[in-house]
Image (tube, helix red, strand yellow):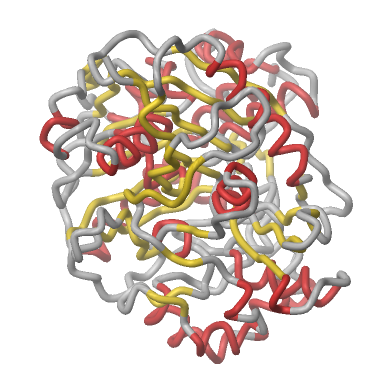
């Protein structure tokens, strides 16, 4: 029996999970950390708080393991940017989170360069991505000289902390989300760095997703010299954890947001309207794998809003039973564009909207409408992906917190008109990080061996659609361009 640790640094909390190569039941430790909203549309994290929470969970798990740890893999919220001083190890400010909208006007000003952005990075001009966030941090905060400045995503920060400053690295799956990385040459783009005013010399070294980056050093409660050998952005990690290693396989993660990734193989496709082209992973074999992605910014975050913002539920787990207590939403539609709309709209000025409320509307109807929004947003993204990309989706593998809701997954199958498959192990994001690290250290011999470990929990076959999608699209139109003063 061999154990690999997966460090899963999410948007609202962090988890360390022990993954055993022989199928022994795993265990984990979880901590939430604070979210900061200093202005409307701004979302920030304290990188030191993320590290403290992660270090606590890591120590919690290590103390329960009575054997050597083969490797550590890291998966992380993507696009969130932290900048720090290598001499002190202290961030120059709070990290700017992927959900943050403060650079929307900057992105608008860069529209003449859209073709370059699309061809070089596979992305669109949207404040979602890291590049304009990094530039904003440097413009608005004092920072050290370039040779001492470190700018990275959360994976880079965690590896730097785990290795006591010895390793400053990232992998292509995270680099491809920055708007600074050339996904064809698999290197930082000097042109994009110059365009966004981000110093190339302050960016991390890009290494394969399955690779030894360094070893643990001076982490409280953790042995030294544990190899850190896997990195992937959370959505690419979930794709790998779902073992979607063959072109044409796809997954959707219902987390804080929802992200649909479709494996398109080792040839980088041309830009596709409404979709992102991203690096799925690089196993160090000279053939990086690419994916088309539909990015939905708010799904589970809307459930948290019902819990924390409106007090409609006491626990996120209550959403499923409350939504299922009514046969439909009673004509209510919730468009959770709290941080703009992602795929296929890409409208940073959209804002959250509730339409169709009557005197008979109850909290159950609103809960149902929030769950329906998960289903409809996923359909919108996949419709755009399959039509523009010329691909056929035969099934959808699902994971994430909301994937426990059978009723929601059945409606998802109905709307997509393809089977939806839920694995026995829902936490596939952490699994992907563990698999990548284990491959680098010989814990698993191949992706075929990993594929044999995937097991089905439940399959949802499509039935008839409800016919509500057209009304949903009307609600989406009412949310769009709301915060754009130029549109008035």
Q: Is residue 41 or residue 460 the one in the foreground?
A: 41
Q: Residue, x 52% and y 34% (percent of image)?
A: 8
Q: Position of residue 9 (x, y in %)?
A: 57, 37
Q: Position of residue 72 (x, y in %)?
A: 44, 35
Q: How many marks?
A: 0
Left or right of residue 79: residue 379: left
Quick one: quadrant of the N terminus? top left
Q: Residue, x 46% and y 77% (percent of image)?
A: 188
Left or right of residue 315: residue 428: left
Q: Position of residue 474 (x, y in %)?
A: 53, 50
Q: Quadrant of residue 458?
A: top left
Compared to 327, does 401 lie above or below?
below
Compared to 9, does 68 lie above or below?
above
Q: Quadrant of residue 290?
A: bottom left
Compared to 88, does 423 lie above or below?
above
Compared to 480, does 47 lie above or below?
above
Q: Quadrant of residue 410?
A: top left
Quick one: quadrant of the C terminus? bottom right
Q: Position of residue 423 (x, y in %)?
A: 28, 21
Residue 365 visible here: no
Left or right of residue 396: residue 181: right
Q: Residue, x 21% and y 24% (percent of image)?
A: 454
Q: Is residue 316 or residue 444 the one in the foreground?
A: 444
Residue 103 visible here: yes
């Amino acid at each position: 029996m061999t154990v690999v640790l997966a460090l899963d640094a999410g948007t609202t909390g962090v988890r360390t999970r022990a993954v055993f190569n022989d199928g022994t039941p795993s265990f984990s430790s979880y901590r939430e950390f604070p979210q900061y909203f200093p202005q409307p549309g701004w979302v920030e994290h304290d990188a030191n708080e993320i590290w403290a929470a992660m270090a606590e969970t890591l120590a919690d798990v290590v103390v329960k393991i009575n054997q050597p740890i083969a490797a550590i893999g890291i998966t992380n919220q993507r696009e969130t940017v932290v900048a720090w001083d290598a001499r002190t190890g202290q961030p120059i400010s709070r990290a700017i989170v992927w959900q943050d909208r403060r650079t929307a006007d900057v992105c608008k000003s860069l529209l003449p360069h859209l073709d370059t952005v699309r061809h070089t990075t596979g992305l669109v001009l949207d404040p979602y991505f890291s590049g304009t966030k990094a530039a904003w941090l440097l413009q608005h905060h004092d920072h050290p000289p370039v040779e001492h400045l470190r700018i990275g995503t959360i994976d880079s920060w965690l590896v730097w902390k785990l290795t006591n400053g010895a390793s400053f690295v990232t992998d292509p799956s995270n680099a491809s989300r920055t708007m600074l990385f050339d996904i064809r040459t698999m290197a930082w783009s000097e042109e994009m760095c110059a365009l966004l005013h981000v110093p190339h010399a302050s960016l991390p070294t890009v290494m394969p997703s399955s690779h030894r980056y360094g070893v643990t050093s001076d982490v409280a409660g953790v042995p030294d010299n544990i190899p850190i050998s896997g990195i992937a952005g959370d959505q690419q990690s979930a794709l790998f954890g779902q073992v979607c290693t063959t072109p044409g396989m796809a997954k959707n993660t219902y987390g804080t947001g929802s992200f649909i990734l479709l494996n398109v193989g080792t040839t980088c496709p041309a830009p596709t309207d409404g979709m992102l082209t991203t690096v799925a992973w690089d196993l160090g074999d000279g053939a990086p794998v690419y994916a088309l992605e539909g990015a939905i910014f708010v799904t589970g975050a809307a459930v948290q809003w019902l819990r924390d913002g409106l007090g409609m539920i006491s626990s996120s787990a209550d959403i499923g039973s409350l939504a299922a207590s009514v046969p439909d939403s009673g004509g209510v539609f919730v468009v959770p564009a709290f941080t703009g709309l992602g795929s296929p709209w890409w409208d940073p000025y959209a804002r959250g909207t509730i339409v169709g409320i009557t005197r008979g509307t109850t909290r159950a109807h609103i809960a149902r409408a929030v769950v329906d929004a998960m289903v409809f947003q996923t359909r919108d993204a996949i419709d755009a992906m399959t039509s523009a990309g010329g691909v056929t989706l035969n099934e959808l593998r699902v994971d994430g917190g909301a994937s426990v809701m059978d009723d929601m997954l059945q409606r998802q199958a109905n709307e997509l008109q393809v089977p939806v498959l839920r694995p026995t192990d829902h936490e596939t994001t952490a699994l992907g990080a563990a698999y990548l690290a284990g491959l680098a250290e010989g814990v698993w011999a191949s992706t075929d061996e990993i594929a044999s470990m995937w097991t089905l929990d439940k399959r949802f076959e499509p039935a008839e659609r409800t016919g509500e999608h057209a009304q949903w699209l009307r609600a989406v139109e009412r949310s769009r361009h709301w915060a754009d003063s130029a549109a008035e």
